[in-house]
Amino acid sequence: MGQGMTQNPGTILVRPQMGENIGAAARAMLNFGLDHMRIVAPRDGWPNPAAVAMASGAGRVLDAALLCDDLPAALGDFHFVFATTARPRDMTTPVYSPEAAMRLAAEKIAAGQRVGIMFGPERAGLENDDIARANAIITVPVNPEYPSLNLAQCVLLVGYEWRRATQEITAVEPSMPGTEPATAQEIAHLADHYEDRLEEAGFFFPAHKAQAMKLKLRNMWSSFPMTAQDVRMFHGMMRQLVRWKDSAD
Amino acid sequence: MGQGMTQNPGTILVRPQMGENIGAAARAMLNFGLDHMRIVAPRDGWPNPAAVAMASGAGRVLDAALLCDDLPAALGDFHFVFATTARPRDMTTPVYSPEAAMRLAAEKIAAGQRVGIMFGPERAGLENDDIARANAIITVPVNPEYPSLNLAQCVLLVGYEWRRATQEITAVEPSMPGTEPATAQEIAHLADHYEDRLEEAGFFFPAHKAQAMKLKLRNMWSSFPMTAQDVRMFHGMMRQLVRWKDSAD
């Protein structure tokens, strides 16, 4: 990971469609000092000449961008991930304004954490499965009668708030050993572990509700401010419950 | 003057060049509830089909726009005018951030004044003669190594700050049904339930560490911002794991 990775939030473009928009997002990022981009499954492949043409002057953001096959791969090493959505969804994930979100991001980054921000595809935005991987949601307070922000505009506003937040931030809380936050990958593994065992145990019942239950559960894990130690504790609990079951066989 | 004129700042595009940028500015405005545009001496005349094509959905801003021959005509009936510039110039005019500027604008408009914001032509920006007509300057705090905001992006950021200034926007607490926070009693019951079952399952091992493990677990439950729904989910998970164990007997 480059130096920028630890100092600025990463921008994660999830299944972007038009190369032009990827290039425009790179420009919007660099305007406010963001330079770490990850691109998940871009529709038109990568590299993309249209992105390069549009990025004029911000090509180095594209050159340094990480191409990722899927969202878990893109999120793995972040400790805290925001999802941007046009409007709050029917989920329990906390919703922040861009300003509050970037203040929180600045605090976390100052404490040594890695923070990422997901932006969805141009038309449809992020899907619920994507959002379930986020710790928090960012919603831009647009005019409800005309909410037409495009991808690069959304990146621009978040980048603007990042710059505002970091020109003000000062004091940082020191962290105690053992209390380092779990990464997105650790939480994803925990979610997988529980989902697999609970599936075996017949928890996801009735079948037509299974998908919604799984989504709710994943949302729940990522809504908790879990430490690496908490994650180990949950793994240990489940392993012991399975041993208990097996010893009863 | 329309009703919007007295309630929102007017957007004054000074000698804009590309119709596309005028259309994009109209969209950026409407995203944040600005709907009063004035256009001073546009390079390609007016109306401009390229502007209309780009404005999709925000055409009514263009329809209502006032065409002005020169800047004095465009500014005549405003009480207070801001000029946007890429960087502070060597002038004595006060310089505001977009946030501070739109707070000031909101105060003046609330007091019944009319406020306008000038945006310069795409390449060169406003000239010193234009800026000399302004009461104050707005400068967006961009990355000095890459200050490439285009016209519509500048309008977007100012519009965003207008909306922030006029609506009390902070972090939105999720308030969907089922998302009310769990009470301390509900969390204590959950902690008891898990402690009892995990005790049966032999989780608290070795014995001399059992007390510390239980304390850590109780601390963990109360460190999570759990909803009542999360608590029910955890109860359900444990009950099902016990049923699974019992069915294996």
Image (tube, coloured by chain):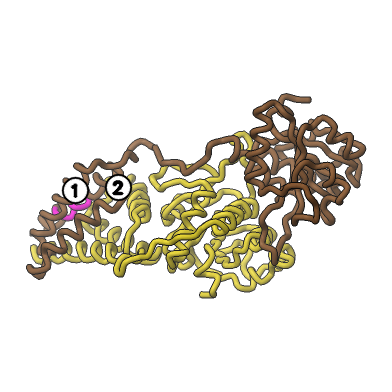
Chain colours: A yellow, B brown
Percent across and percent down for residue B126 are 83, 50
Residue A201 among those drawn in magenta: no
Q: CA distance from mark 2 to mark 1?
A: 11 Å
Which of the 4 image quadrants contains residue B167?
top right
Q: Which picture quadrant has residue A53?
A: bottom right
Q: Residues in magenta?
A: B235-242
- Label 2–label 1 contact, CB within 8 A: yes
Q: Which residue is mark 2?
A: B226
Categorize mark 2 by other alpha carbons within 10 Å: few (<14), some (14-19), many (20+): many
Q: Nearer the viewer, residue A67 or B95?
A: B95
Residue in view at x 40 percent, y 48 percent:
A93
Residue beneath label 1, please?
A: B190
Return the disc, 2 or 1, that comes first in the chain's sequence: 1
User: Dividing the picture into quarters, in which one does residue A249 lie?
Assistant: bottom left
Label 2: chain?
Answer: B
The label shown at residue A2 is none
Query: At which x and y percent is residue A45?
Result: 62, 67
Q: How many residues crowd around disc 1 within 10 Å: few (fewer than 14), some, or many (20 or more)?
A: some
Q: Which of the pair A71/B93 is nearer the observer?
A: B93
Front residue (pair B173, B201): B173
**Does the magenta stretch mainly form a helix, a strand or a loop?**
helix
Q: Quadrant of the C terminus of chain B?
A: bottom left
